[in-house]
Amino acid sequence: MSLTGKHILSSDLFDRDELERLFELADLLVPVARGEQVTRVLEGAVMASLFFEASTRTRLSCESAFLRLGGAVTSTTGTGVTSISKGESLADTARVVGGYCDLVVMRHPEVQSIHDFAGATNVPVVNAGNGAGEHPTQALLDMFTLHREFDRLGKSMDGRRIALVGDLLHGRTVHSLMKLLTRYEGLTIACVSPAELGMPAELLELAAARGHQVEVSDKPAIALREADVVYATRLQTERFADKPVPYSDDFRIDRALVERVCTADAVIMHPLPRDSRSGSNDLATDLNSDPRLAIFRQTDNGIPTRMALFASVLGVVDEIRSSLRTASWYRPAFTGPDDAPFYRR
Amino acid sequence: MSLTGKHILSSDLFDRDELERLFELADLLVPVARGEQVTRVLEGAVMASLFFEASTRTRLSCESAFLRLGGAVTSTTGTGVTSISKGESLADTARVVGGYCDLVVMRHPEVQSIHDFAGATNVPVVNAGNGAGEHPTQALLDMFTLHREFDRLGKSMDGRRIALVGDLLHGRTVHSLMKLLTRYEGLTIACVSPAELGMPAELLELAAARGHQVEVSDKPAIALREADVVYATRLQTERFADKPVPYSDDFRIDRALVERVCTADAVIMHPLPRDSRSGSNDLATDLNSDPRLAIFRQTDNGIPTRMALFASVLGVVDEIRSSLRTASWYRPAFTGPDDAPFYRR
Amino acid sequence: MSLTGKHILSSDLFDRDELERLFELADLLVPVARGEQVTRVLEGAVMASLFFEASTRTRLSCESAFLRLGGAVTSTTGTGVTSISKGESLADTARVVGGYCDLVVMRHPEVQSIHDFAGATNVPVVNAGNGAGEHPTQALLDMFTLHREFDRLGKSMDGRRIALVGDLLHGRTVHSLMKLLTRYEGLTIACVSPAELGMPAELLELAAARGHQVEVSDKPAIALREADVVYATRLQTERFADKPVPYSDDFRIDRALVERVCTADAVIMHPLPRDSRSGSNDLATDLNSDPRLAIFRQTDNGIPTRMALFASVLGVVDEIRSSLRTASWYRPAFTGPDDAPFYRR
């Protein structure tokens, strides 16, 4: 299969071979993402960045990835898209915008939106989040992070123990990730959440059907033992309105817990944003200088992952290697003050 | 006359020779607009995109056109321009922004704004809509569409029958278009609207004075017969507040009507957005696969038209032909799923 | 000292040698800023433009400066940064965005913000205004304007009489400027304001301690006599809420006053925006064609100043001279209709 010209709407699209091809390309693009090398393979190409719902992080990451390939971006944010308020269908918008660009990245609060949109244009559309639906580029960057972390640690992906922790019911990200995890072999997937916020049954069944060991638990302190990966998520309090949040301190992942239960080479991830306010039951900031904390390696990985995806969809993969040149501007040795240990250069 | 260095505030600026020069250049730029070729004639140039009123479609089209020429864009949207709320005059804003860029594209809700702005800077200013005033780049892309459609059909522009349909009173677009139509010879212009929403008298008189046949009607089913072009417009319901809208089903242009009254090679246009909600008295979506529907060829034409205009205003026309190179990225054969028939490659 | 890799948070960072190096570079970049020459030294680099508070002028100027160096920009405006509303710390935002770009320009309404942000990323951060704190790039462009105006007039910077006029209490800009002025020798600094809106004592003391003559006055008509520079500021009425504004017509700087008290080669500046509404006690528009009015030379100077700063921070200064090429597009001889007299080409 080739990704060239494809709409990227779901993480279902990626089998293991496709993932590995993509990660090989993303590895090659890491120095470009870091501003150490330059490629201009997409010079002249235009991406339309349509964020009908705010997501600054995802938007900046997608835009930067396209710019790093040498392309240009035209961008719109917010629901105040006037045409749509005048009764324009999303299909009309899609066909019109398709005539303005070579690639569309779209986020929209409604699940169906991305399908209506992509059905009305042949210009490739990349889903950057469709309501409670999917977020395939986030799942890809999560998997690319596993690929790089395990590579650093000399582990293979197959046979690992992955703990998914937190609000597994509302987290679109963790659902997309589950689908990709099942593409590998012999994993143990521990789903750790309050009972009310568990992983949807069909995803548990999918993992089991593909031969993985699935555990369900509400006890992080137990489930995290021996985990190769701890993937924490934020409680999506904005979805609870008045209901009391069924969350306890058990779900605060902080230095004390990690020191007590995690192995020395555990990889701790989070899709971000994390709730850093004091008392939040999320991934704590007292782990910031712990090299097991991979959350910023993870966000950094968003750039080469999205570059690799865009280059694949636009069919310029074969031109990249010969296009690379060294960047001449200053780049810090490490992006963050806590980056040095365990950060692969 | 040369357009180099001119402010583009009104469609009055364009006589027939100028239009034909511009369309020849736009024809050359179609492959660049489609992402099949690349030019970098404006590499290093900066456009300021100032949208004091939202218009996502026009903004993205203008920005993409400038990017496709190799330029860069800095963009601002919304009325929350802080300086102006602090008492800054539009003239000050204009002179300041003129020092930041090589070309300004501006939309503003007030008619006078564009004149105040352009009077205060020598950097070329392009009007992208000034309230109830003008929208010259829309009129140019409409005329370019006629040029390409008639070329495809082997017809000349002169002597054609053009039906303008809908709300002809409030439609800034259709007023700018009237002015350009009168630059040609021997047209029959049928203005079809409810009596309350008729074409302003001075525009009817202008057309008559320039020797065109003008018809006024409120019966689309009759006026559309033998029309070479049907230019439909949306009822601007946002301008009616509480008043009942004087519109009937007669103004719904759908497949049934088109099959019954239009010729086989009629060209059906619309400035978009159209109201696609069921029951709207606008151009119906059941025409989407009818090759006479030219509305997306029309929006696609916005890119090469605006590229041609920007290149002319910035005086780089003579460098374009030799600058063209083939693009290497993927581009679908057709931008929309319904594009294939009648779409000139 | 080298600026390469430094965060630019305060104008304290710049001593006289650093200022002169920067201005020499900015002089070289003036033709690029004006669209007469092109450089692409930052081709491939990405700047993140984060404006958590609106400031269209500053944002467009910073973005244009980075684009003029050949770089690309990804931009976000407004407080609606969703991650932060979900409890994300500014430190997390900083580390994440640092992984997306090579340089961050940030404006934020809170003084502490820029320090929290810059402390969490090694990617250089430029302060574009932190609440009542600093605005170092504005101070630099003001000093660069003095450098160019005095150079045109054959005056040296040392020993000049500088009158700062208006609301000297709330003006962040005039505070940053004071710090830079003290880097020179033997100035007379006249601080002219209503008593309630005087220059903070610590800044008066700093100037005195560095050997400058400091005068405090509330009589513009007297204090402006023999001034080499009149630096007017806008009364920040938005900070007064219900309190009566302690301002009189004495602070209106108009043609009548300037003709009466200023010398023939005075330089009249203003950080803009100015309040141009009739009756405002600000710099009057009847001076627009007076060549002593340097306010638009000043805003124009923002581009080469910020280009020089970004190039210095990113360590590409030595590549600029050899990278310059002539631009081929149209550029008006003068940016504004009143620019010709006294404007150095």
Image (cartoon, coloured by chain):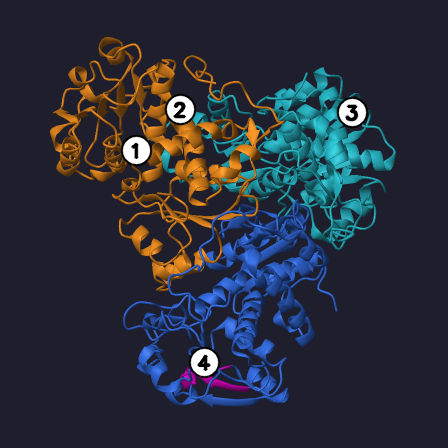
Chain colours: A cyan, B orange, C blue
> Could you tell me which chain the residue with mark 3 belongs to?
A
Closest to the camera, between mark 1 and mark 3, is 1
Q: Earlier in the sequence, mark 1 or mark 2?
A: 1
Residue located beneath label 2 in the image: B296
Tags 3 and 4 both on a single chain = no
Residue A167 can be seen in this image? yes
The residue at 21%/31% (across/down) is: B167
Closest to the camera, between mark 4 and mark 2, is 4
| Up/down of B28 relative to C312, above or below | above
| Up/down of B103 relative to C272, above or below | above
Which secondary structure, mark 2?
helix
Task: Tell me if label 3 and label 4 are in contact, CB under 8 Å.
Answer: no
Q: What separation in Å lies between label 1 and label 3 (alpha carbons)?
A: 71 Å
Q: Which residues are magenta?
A: C188-199
Q: Nearer the viewer, residue C194 or B99?
A: B99
Few, some or many C-alpha atoms within 10 Å of disc 3 (few <14, some 14-19, many ≥20)?
many
Task: Tell me if label 4 and label 2 are in contact, CB under 8 Å.
Answer: no
Q: What separation in Å lies between label 4 and label 2 (alpha carbons)?
A: 58 Å
Give the amino acid type for the residue marked by disc 2 in the picture. Answer: Phe
Indicate yes or no whether the magenta region holds residue C191. Answer: yes
Residue C124 can be seen in this image? no
> On the picture, is C341 further left or further right than A290?
left
Closest to the camera, between mark 2 and mark 3, is 2
**Residue C165 is drawn in which quadrant?**
bottom left
Residue located beneath label 3 in the image: A187
Q: What x and y, as percent, mark residue B170?
A: 22, 37
Tags 4 and 2 both on a single chain = no
Tags 1 and 3 both on a single chain = no
